[in-house]
Image: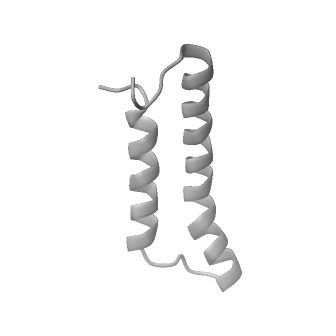
Amino acid sequence: MHPELPALLTSVLVWESAALGGLPTGPPAIAYAIRIGGPATVTAIACWEIHRLRTRYGVTLRG
């Protein structure tokens, strides 16, 4: 298995889950913040993990 696969797969699945799920209950502004904030945070952490793999270990998607 490629070392970057877990980070990429997690990002795709969390956005898919957010797209298919309904809005949480509560005021609309908070509901949208929760709906977008969770997947955005997971994606930011995944990007950081991929960056770290590239800079520290030389792992790229092609090699």
Q: Quadrant of the N terminus?
A: top left
Name the outermost residue toward the top.
57
Name the outermost residue toward the front.
62
Along the line of sight, the residue nearer the viewer: 2 or 15: 2
| Residue 58, image x, y percentages | 53, 17
Q: Is residue 17 left or right of residue 31?
A: left
Along the line of sight, the residue nearer the viewer: 2 or 20: 2
Q: Residue at x 41, y 53 (%)?
A: 12
Q: Residue at x 60, y 31 (%)?
A: 51
Q: Residue at x 47, y 27 (%)?
A: 60
Within the image, what quadrant is residue 19 found in? bottom left
| Residue 13, image x, y percentages | 39, 54
Answer above or below: position of 9 versus 21: above
Answer above or below: position of 8 versus 39: above
Q: Residue at x 54, y 40 (%)?
A: 46
Q: Is residue 20 left or right of residue 43?
A: left
Answer above or below: position of 44 versus 36: above
| Residue 35, image x, y percentages | 57, 69
Within the image, what quadrant is residue 6 found in? top left
